[in-house]
Image (cartoon, rainbow, N blue to C red):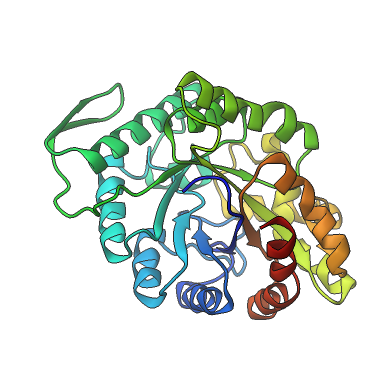
């Protein structure tokens, strides 16, 4: 999956909805013409009240069996602490057999909130990065080879073979909020994952240049990988409603430093309430199609070729249908 054709996806918010609802939304996205459906894998949500955290591996199996066309992926799963990467590889190989060509493994370094709850010690950033790099290398080797003897600093396998795997390996996308992981994506992954709503300079001067640097170091072409971004959008014919919907995701307005080290959803929820009035700043809020297209335009021009739309409100069916009717056709017409 490479650059060239703009793809438009839907983010199934596992923090906000239970597994049955999420499955219905995935089926709806397939019917409405979205190109992909992505979900996060977490053990605890960012809020305790009305929070959810269904297991992504189980849910993706149901989604694969219930949809016909959309690509299914994780944005993101952490294959380093709660999971052994060899088991992650096996699970995604199985998903790849169930839905050939329709599965992507998106990975990242994770959050302490989802790891320490099962007894894992939360390592420093340097170790988290090296664990991610090593886990991706192991997963990719298991996708391509049999009887894998892997001797890493953190993970080992002895004659490991995945007996059921698709003819074409499942693509691995790496999420990067800083240059190191972004560079790694360019070097070894099939795709890169980012999120919208941050300073322009972060994308244009740090993250995307780091992806290109990684590609160059590996001798890969610029279009060798897809650049996917989760677009935080709140679009509604009622602007006041669009603004109000963002408050559910007020935690996004917290800084990385504020969120770092939080291990209890109740504490995250408490902190999020302190920034509800500025929650909209991380979202592209609009009630006008032309305005909204112009909000999205820079991300396409910067080089993102796969936009995955995350709608904040509780009425996902309304948001999905409205977007499919008014926004998706315009994006496809103008940007391909």
Give coordinates of residue 101: x percent, y percent: 36, 58
Q: Is residue 307 left or right of residue 238?
A: left
Residue 260, quarter of picture: top right
Residue at image point 46% right, 77% down: 20
Give coordinates of residue 292: x percent, y percent: 82, 61
Residue 198, quarter of picture: top right
Give coordinates of residue 196: x percent, y percent: 71, 47
Q: Is residue 230 left or right of residue 234?
A: left
| Residue toward you, 194 or 18 | 194
Quadrant for the C terminus, please.
bottom right
Residue at image point 61% right, 26% down: 210
- For residue 254, say whether it is visible: no
Q: Residue furthest top?
A: 217
Residue at image point 69% right, 27% down: 206
| Residue toward you, 258 or 212 | 212
Q: How many numbered discs sit on the rendered protein?
A: 0
Q: Is residue 163 above or below residue 205?
A: below
Give coordinates of residue 94: x percent, y percent: 25, 58
Residue at image point 49% right, 19% down: 217
- For residue 217, say whether it is visible: yes
Q: Is residue 71 left or right of residue 296?
A: left
Q: Is residue 106 above or below residue 29?
A: above
């Amino acid at each position: 999956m490479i650059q060239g054709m703009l793809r438009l996806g839907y983010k199934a918010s596992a923090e906000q909805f239970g597994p049955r609802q999420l499955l219905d939304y995935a089926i709806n996205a397939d019917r409405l013409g979205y190109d992909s459906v992505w979900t996060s894998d977490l053990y605890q949500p960012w809020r305790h009240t009305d929070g959810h955290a269904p297991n992504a591996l189980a849910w993706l199996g149901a989604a694969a069996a219930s949809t016909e066309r959309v690509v299914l992926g994780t944005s993101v799963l952490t294959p380093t602490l709660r999971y052994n990467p060899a088991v992650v590889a096996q699970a995604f190989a199985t998903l790849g057999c169930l839905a050939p060509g329709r599965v992507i493994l998106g990975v990242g370094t994770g959050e302490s909130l989802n790891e320490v709850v099962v007894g894992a010690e939360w390592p420093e950033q340097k170790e988290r990065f090296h664990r991610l790099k090593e886990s991706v290398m192991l997963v990719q080797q298991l996708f391509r080879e049999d009887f894998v003897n892997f001797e890493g600093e953190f993970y080992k396998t002895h004659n490991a073979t995945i007996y059921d795997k698709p003819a074409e390996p499942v693509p691995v996308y790496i999420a990067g909020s800083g240059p190191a992981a972004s560079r790694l994506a360019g070097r070894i992954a099939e795709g890169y994952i980012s999120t919208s709503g941050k300073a322009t300079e972060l994308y244009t001067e740090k993250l995307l240049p780091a992806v290109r640097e990684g590609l160059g170091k590996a001798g890969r072409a610029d279009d060798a990988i897809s650049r996917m971004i989760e677009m935080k959008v709140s679009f509604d014919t009622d602007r006041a409603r669009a603004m109000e919907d963002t408050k559910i995701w007020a935690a996004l307005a917290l800084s990385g430093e504020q969120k770092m080290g939080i291990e209890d959803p109740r504490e995250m929820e408490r902190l999020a309430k302190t920034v509800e009035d500025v929650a909209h700043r991380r979202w592209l809020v609009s009630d006008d199609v032309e305005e909204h297209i112009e909000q999205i335009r820079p991300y396409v021009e910067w080089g993102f070729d796969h936009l995955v739309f995350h709608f904040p409100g509780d009425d996902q069916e309304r948001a999905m249908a409205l977007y499919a009717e008014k926004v998706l056709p315009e994006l496809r017409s103008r940007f391909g």
